[in-house]
Amino acid sequence: MINLKELEVWFVTGSQSLYGEETLKQVAAHSQTIAGSLNDASQVPAKVVFKPTVKSTEEIYAICMEANTAKNCIGIIAWMHTFSPAKMWITGLKILQKPLCHLHTQFNRDIPWNDIDMDFMNLNQSAHGDREFGFMVSRMRKNRKVIVGHWQDPAVLDDINTWSRAAAGWNDWQGAKFVRFGDNMRFVAVTDGDKVEAEYKFGYAVNTHGIGDLVQVINETSDAAIDQLISEYEDEYSVVASLKSDGAQYNSLREAAKIEIGLRTFLEAGNYKGFTDTFEDLHGMAQLPGIASQRMMAAGYGFAGEGDWKTAALVRAMKVMGSGLPGGNSFMEDYTYHFDPENPMVLGSHMLEICPSIAHGKPSCQVHPLGIGGKADPVRLVFNSGAGPALNASLIDMGNRFRLLVNEVEAVTPLHDLPKLPVARVLWKPFPDMKTGCAAWILAGGAHHTGYSQNLTATHLQDFADMANIEFALIGKDTNLYQFKNELRWNDVYYQINK
Ligand code: MN
């Protein structure tokens, strides 16, 4: 359901008419070469589309206008091969609504020491042309990504990759619809927030359906469809004996499959990109959706429990940004701690709903009682998650703004088997260390719910936050509490003034 190759990044080169036809021809040829090379680069996930050189206020305005309305255009990469007087960029940049990446590059990598003359200098001016452009974007207080280096440098391609993925996530939110089955878990604060402001700021809509609307669709599921889905479960997972067709709880598996089919039908019919549910509102359902939510996440849908629509939308955006990369993205919750001073760790999990895209090995399909919710035993996929670098991201509503908080972590292999733990789980060590990482998270008001990623970096999410024009706070290897607390205070002042 996610295909980044359908998306386009437009490569726009700025210049001016002053240079004459001959130079402008070379400018266009060079731009075409760079755009083509970026398009062919395996690191760049979207198409890179060459656009003719813009040389006047009118041409710049026209290309920005066109980008705004082009459905598949997720952003613009701008480059000033020559000098492009930046007053010409004001009206265009003023209306540009798509993300902007300023590629500060140069056609030739090296100075041609023996041959360099004034013709060469006249053509290869990005060292100062890009500064003029940069001034105007800064003068207009517009967020953008600045990438510096030669266009064939793998590090530059990596940066473009990261930015394009963030732009794809941002594009995906525009006009997206998320559905909540039931409202928020009663009395919970951090998962709630201003849905009107979110729609205005982020471009996605969040609306609620009573659980009865979903139950009605679930109840229309045919036995044949259930049989087919169960055979899919048997192919993909190790199904425990009690859930086999001759097992004591086979009917629970049939109920779980029925819920999944109904849920998928409902989401497809409404063109939703994600959903939330809550164990406090399951009227008419046999069990809390476990495996259903897990598999919908694996299919690319955003999800979070207990009505947490902000995290559901964030998980969806993270899935888009990470599309095609090894590793996965999941709804997550900081569950319980290992406070061994020699080896402190967090155990992340949820009641049921961790995405199998982060599973290490084949998940086991099991059924166990669930203490809360008052329903029948729900079926779920149980697995460990792999070791390696990862992060947790939390989107919170601070009242006057949204804050995207990220903590870089190192996932670790569980030290022991957890034979009685009936849910998927991840163990990680927060950076810079357990005490600082957790304290910083709590001081920043980070939620217990997060989007957990194995394949995104803090930079993906920082670029994303810049596109959304919201606060970004990072807890990483270099975080110290003194500095972090000041940063939060300074941000408070910044967002009071910069409304
Ligand atoms: Mn929860």
Image: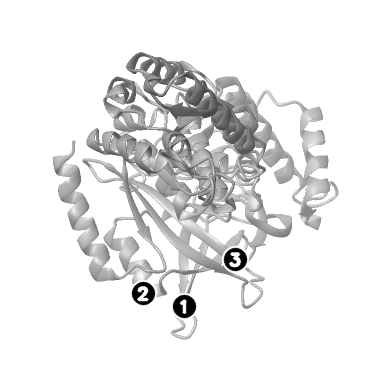
Tag 2: residue type?
Lys
Among numbered discs 1 and 2, the one appearing first in the sequence: 1
Front-most of residues 454 and 303: 454
The residue at which mark 2 appears reads as 435
Q: In the rendered structure, which disc, 3 or 1, sits on the residue that comes first in sequence?
A: 1
Residue 1 visible in the displayed image: no
Residue at 49 percent of width and 45 percent of height? 116
Closer-to-camera residue (23/94): 23
Please tell me whether mark 1 sits on a helix, a strand or a loop. Answer: loop
Image point (65%, 38%), residue name: 299
User: For disc 1, does the CB lie below 8 Å from ligand 1?
Assistant: no
Residue 6's spot in the image, x, y percent? 63, 27
Residue 98, compared with residue 344, is above or below; it is: above
Q: Is residue 11 above or below residue 278?
A: above
Quarter in which the N terminus is drawn: top right
Q: Nearer the viewer, mark 3 or mark 1?
A: 3
Q: Amino acid at mark 1?
A: Pro
Label 3 element class: strand
* Residue 132 pos. (x, y %): 30, 36
Quarter where residue 139 is shown:
top left
Percent across and percent down for residue 55 are 40, 20
Q: Are marks 1 and 2 in contact (CB under 8 Å)?
A: yes
Residue at 51%, 62% (x, y): give it. 348
Rendered image: mark on residue 386: none
Question: Which of the numbered marks, if any, corresponds to residue 344?
Answer: 1
Quadrant position of residue 127: top left
Residue type at the position of mark 3? Gly
The residue pinned by badge 3 equals 388
